[in-house]
Image (tube, rainbow, N blue to C red):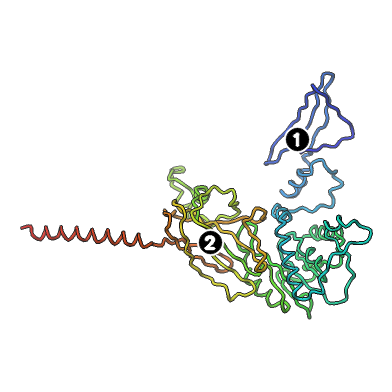
Amino acid sequence: IFFFLTNADYWIKPGDHVTMEASCQDCYLRIQSINILNLEHEMEVIKNFTKSEDLLSLGNEAELCSALANLQTSRADALEQTCVLEPTEIALLNNIPYHEGFKMAMRKVLSSLAPEKLWQPVDPPGQDTEMNSGSGQSSIAPSTSDPFYVLDVSEGFSLLPIIAGTLGEVKPYSSVEKDQHCVTLDLISEANHFPKETLEFWLRHIEDEAAVLQRPKSDKLWSIIILDVIEPSGLIQQEIMEKAAISRCLLQSGGKIFPQYVLMFGMLVESQTLVEESAVQGTEHTLGLNIAPFINQFQVPIRVFLDLSSLPCIPLSQPVELLRLDLMTPYLNTSNREVKVRICRSGQVTAVPFWFHLCLDDEVRLDTSGEASHWKQAAVVLENPIRVQVGEELVLSVEHHKSNVSITVKQSWCLVAVIETLTKTIMAGMVLEKELKVLHSDP
């Protein structure tokens, strides 16, 4: 919907003709002008719907999207205080199960540490109960006891510190870097009657941003540390196990890292789309040269930012658990694992898509392939497709090394195939033996 604001009132009646000048440049729809033509005269309603100099002044694609989304709904002088978020950050804010899951898991941890420090929402006097319950506001008397310390080192814009602060006597720390993000979090806190001085921005308290994992105070430890384990692209964050090792040393007794462990799932699929998009196909020459073999030497075996719900593919197996990464108890981790996968549909295995379950605890899980997920998925594309039949088993060799996951598909010979091969070999040997006897008896 394009809104336009003007000081004049323009009326239309049956029989009038409304014309507009529209353009689509750089994948953005723009309305340049609107004219109303009636029987008496032509009246120009609006010109220069978007000024080119305004568009040029915007710094990046996110700001351009923001400006076009709010086209003519606010005046230029009202855009001084804006918070520009990336599309992945907007998707994260819209992920309701993500925030509800973290709230539930954090409440359980804090309750196990000290139940008396948890806040129970109380309706402020003079406010309607129904309205207050929807906004999550609470009226709590300040406490002089030591609070829980919660550190959120999620990348980008995150509301988890504010959510943690609403649970009880909590001192939440946010690791957001941009000033506009800090201002926005302060405004959100103020709008929800959250004490502004309670939320701290951790990067303002440390000298080196690389050393974000430190004690909150010299004599205190963290109750909860929230780590970003999976990138929006669908891959594991780099150096996540190293960060988890440091985090475990900074937790108070009974404190937790979120997520506590991560499960990696995958399945075998046949997808011609992934094959075509991952390598140069065909043997046609370009300028007289066969460049496909050369170009394909530099192909990346893993495709990221996939949406499995819309990816054209044929599932050839059921989802299976491929790997477990435990951030709280690392001795349960294995860097190499082999998983047998049974084929449930005949076809050609061309790729192994994978995704993750972030287990905040044994009950609360976040599925990165869920409908509301802000994460995308990834897939390993096989260099050579494998023809499979129903009932056959393939072996997936999964290796996790330095935050990188590699998957190798091996064909497992089933007993029937082995018997058939042995039978063919024996029959061929018998035929060869008869031929040799004939040759030996021929004078």
Q: Residue at x 82, y 66 (%)?
A: 199
Instruction: Report how many numbered discs are placed on residues in the image.
Output: 2
- Camera-side mark, 2 or 1: 2
Name which quarter of the figure residue 117 lies in.
bottom right
Left or right of 265 in this view: 281: left
Left or right of 289 in this view: 24: right
| Residue closer to the observer: 232 or 113 | 113
Q: Is residue 301 visible?
A: no
Disc marking residue 31: 1
| Residue closer to the observer: 21 or 36 | 36
For marks 2 and 1, give the CA distance: 50 Å
Q: Residue at x 86, y 55 (%)?
A: 130
Residue lying at the far front in this picture: please name it.
129
Disc marking residue 320: 2
Residue lying at the far left in this picture: please name it.
443
| Residue closer to the observer: 148 or 186 | 148
Name which quarter of the figure residue 412 lies in.
bottom left
Kindly identify the amino acid type of the residue bearing the numbered disc 1.
Ile
- Mark sitting earlier along the chain (2/1): 1
Residue 143 x/y as whole percent: 88, 73
Left or right of 340 in this view: 31: right
